[in-house]
Image (cartoon, rainbow, N blue to C red):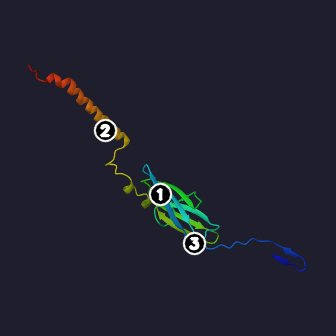
Amino acid sequence: MDLKLGDGSGITRNFQLFVLDRVQQPNIKASTSQEHGQCYLTLSCLVPKAAWVTYSWSQGVSSSPAPEDRWLQEHQADLQLEITKSSSNTFYHCNVSNAISWGMATIDVEPLCNYTANTPDPASSLSYCQAKGLILLLVLGVLITGTVAVHIMPGKLPKQD
């Protein structure tokens, strides 16, 4: 900016101007993996033409944000999670904002961690310790049967002349 003063002198100032667009509607992309009964998720908050934006995440029990939702300390587009079967707060909200606007997207992670389809029914599967115990009982049963057959049964057989 060049400014001419009344006495003929001038002042020159340089300014930097930023033009911000309104934040477009974000979208949450999720990728999952499951190991040892745990569900691991990466949530990515995607915003078209995201420039000069800030991200924040919250976790709650419903698809609508509520005052009792828990704010997470992640200020990045990606959020790493570990979800357990007993998790009750399964809704995650991504808020994207800039100086003039904001947008929010929500995802329910419970269907992504489909425990019923991917983990065996506890009644139909044995733990390592249970399987080991059953094998030991089977071996013990074979040993007892062998001992009875070798030492006790021959003494009870009728003698033949």
Quarter of the figure that contains the N terminus:
bottom right
Compared with 58, 103 (above or below) is below
- Residue drawn 34% across the image and 40% down it: 131
- Marks 2 and 1 sit apart, C-alpha to C-alpha, by 35 Å
- Marks 3 and 2 sit apart, C-alpha to C-alpha, by 60 Å
Tell me where residue 56 appears, x and y as whole percent.
57, 62
Circle 3: is it few (<14), some (14-19), or many (20+) Cα within 10 Å?
A: some
- Residue drawn 89% across the image and 80% down it: 6
From the viewer's perspective, is the residue at label 1 or at label 3 nearer? 1
Residue that numbered label 3 is attached to: 24
First in sequence, mark 3 or 2: give its number: 3
From the viewer's perspective, is the residue at label 3 or at label 2 nearer? 2
Q: Quadrant of residue 103?
A: bottom right
Taking depth in this image into account, of 14 and 100 the one nearest to the observer is 14
Q: Quadrant of residue 142?
A: top left
Quarter of the figure that contains the C terminus:
top left
Taking depth in this image into account, of 42 and 58 the one nearest to the observer is 42
Residue that numbered label 1 is attached to: 32
Compared with 70, 124 (above or below) is above
